[in-house]
Image: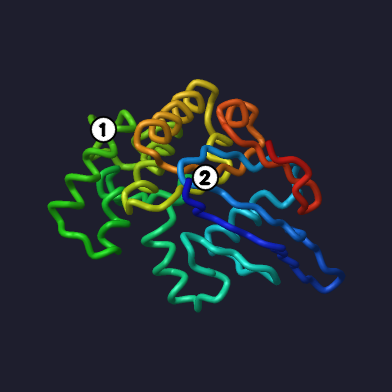
Amino acid sequence: MNTLIEMKNLCKIFKDTAQEVCAVNNVSLSISAGEFSAIVGPSGSGKTTLLNLIGGLDAPTSGSLHVDGKDISLLKEKEMTAFRLHHIGFVFQAYNLIPVLSAKENVAFVMELQGRKKEEMHKRATELLAAVGLGDRLHSLPAQLSGGQQQRVAVARALASKPKFVLADEPTANLDSKSAENLLEIMEQLNKHEGVTFVFSTHDPRVVAKARRVISLEDGKVVSDK
């Protein structure tokens, strides 16, 4: 399988006035196309920081990080923004939907940033919302949707740009059990039937149970990978 993400001796150090914190400590990993992987570990283990590094939201202190064959640690801010837009989908714990836009408009927005044609945007947004079970809520605002429905809109939005992979940071954290199960089922089906690559950062045992690869971190280091 094609290697999508490759990191070698990756480190991220945060400095404050009192001390340095090594959030990611000499991590070397590769993630292939089609994986459904979970990064797990206790609070403070470096899960979210590692995900942010992969997504280009943080820059590494040292080491190399290749995403789809490109060393993203060398990209300038403007180049990184463009790379994220075209290569990486994000699902955040807090949904991050635009409150004044409908579900369909939220999904279409990322394609508008890519400069896609209006007909293509609306067709793909409609198809993606149907795929996540919201074909009847195209014109609903986020405030008119439940938490689980909002997170499904966020998944559709993450897929809208046709990314190489999707990074999901604690996507089930704010959901009730049924909504979390429904969301995971949808993402698992997208992975199996459409080949969408997912990398999760999670505490949720339900996500871990679904994952086909579990990477465990402690104190910024990989302690198991199976």
> Which class describes the residues within 10 Å of circle 1: few (<14), some (14-19), or many (20+)?
some
What percent of the width, then of the height, locates residue 96? Answer: 45, 50
Work out whether residue 19 or residue 10 is closer to the camera in this orientation and state it.
10
Residue 79 visible in image = yes
What amino acid type should be assigned to the residue bearing mark 2? Ala
Residue 146 visible in image = no
The colour scheme is rainbow
The reply, left or right, for residue 194 in relation to residue 61 is left
The reply, left or right, for residue 16 in relation to residue 128 is right
* Extreme-left residue of the structure: 119
Residue 75, relative to residue 126: is it above or below?
Answer: below
Residue position for label 2: 168
User: Residue at (53%, 26%) from the top-left corner?
Assistant: 176
What percent of the width, then of the height, locates residue 84? Answer: 43, 62
User: Residue at (43%, 33%) from the top-left corner?
Assistant: 187
Residue position for label 1: 130
What amino acid type should be assigned to the residue bearing mark 1? Ala
The reply, left or right, for residue 226 in relation to residue 129 is right
Measure the alpha-carbon separation of dots 1 and 2: 20 Å
Work out whether residue 112 or residue 217 is closer to the camera in this orientation and state it.
217
Residue 59, relative to residue 104: is it above or below?
Answer: below
For mark 1, give the secondary structure: helix
Quadrant of the rendering where the C terminus is positioned: top right
Counting every numbered tag in the picture gives: 2
User: Residue at (65%, 52%) from the top-left corner?
Assistant: 29
What percent of the width, then of the height, locates residue 189? Answer: 40, 29
The numbered dot on residue 29 is: none
> Which class describes the residues within 10 Å of circle 2: few (<14), some (14-19), or many (20+)?
many
What percent of the width, then of the height, locates residue 27? Answer: 72, 57
